[in-house]
């Protein structure tokens, strides 16, 4: 799961979460034939069509954090999706991507500042 999301997800209660996570991440995401980036692009389209913007937000953040997609590519995806899932859903994706990109840039700036501070104190 860490390879897909870039962070460890907490285990949920009972067997349901563990079984689901083992199957999805152990089998589906690790199959040959498509890269994680390819799978994420397909999933972003499917989530947009289903209106699952909150789940798409997790995928978009992971794609940026893992270096699979750039902010510019996410912006292009939202425009592309408008023509295939409709303007209302595509526009929701566009605004969500904007929030994800802003958060990502803020985190990158914070890391850069911490790195600069650590180098200056050495």
Image (cartoon, rainbow, N blue to C red):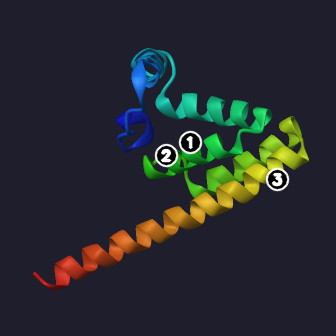
Q: Is residue 105 left or right of residue 97?
A: left
In terms of secondary structure, where does tag 2 sit? helix
Local crowd size for mark 2, using a 10 Å CA cut-off: few (<14), some (14–19), many (≥20): many
- Name the residue located 87 percent from the left edge and 41 percent from the top edge: 83
**Which mark identifies residue 59?**
1
Residue position marked by numbered label 2 in the rendering: 62
In terms of secondary structure, where does tag 1 sit? helix
Foreground: 83 or 9?
9
In terms of secondary structure, where does tag 3 sit? helix
Q: Determine whether 93 is above or below 102 in the image.
A: above
Could you tell me which quadrant the C terminus lies in? Answer: bottom left
The location of residue 62, given as percent across then percent down, is: 49, 46
Q: CA distance from mark 1 to mark 3?
A: 17 Å
Foreground: 11 or 79?
11
Q: Is residue 100 left or right of residue 90?
A: left
Residue position marked by numbered label 3 in the rendering: 91
Please say if the residues under marks 1 and 2 sit with CB atoms less than 8 Å apart.
yes
């Amino acid at each position: 799961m860490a390879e897909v999301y870039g962070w460890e997800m907490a285990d949920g209660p009972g067997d349901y979460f563990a079984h689901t996570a083992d199957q999805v991440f152990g089998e589906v995401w690790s199959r040959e034939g498509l890269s994680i980036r390819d799978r994420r692009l397909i999933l972003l389209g499917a989530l947009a069509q289903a209106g699952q913007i909150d789940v798409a937000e997790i995928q978009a953040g992971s794609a940026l954090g893992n270096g699979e997609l750039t902010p510019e590519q996410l912006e292009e995806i939202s425009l592309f999706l408008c023509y295939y899932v409709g303007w209302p859903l595509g526009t929701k994706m566009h605004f969500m991507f904007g929030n994800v990109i802003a958060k990502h840039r803020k985190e990158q700036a914070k890391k850069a500042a911490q790195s600069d501070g650590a180098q200056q104190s050495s």
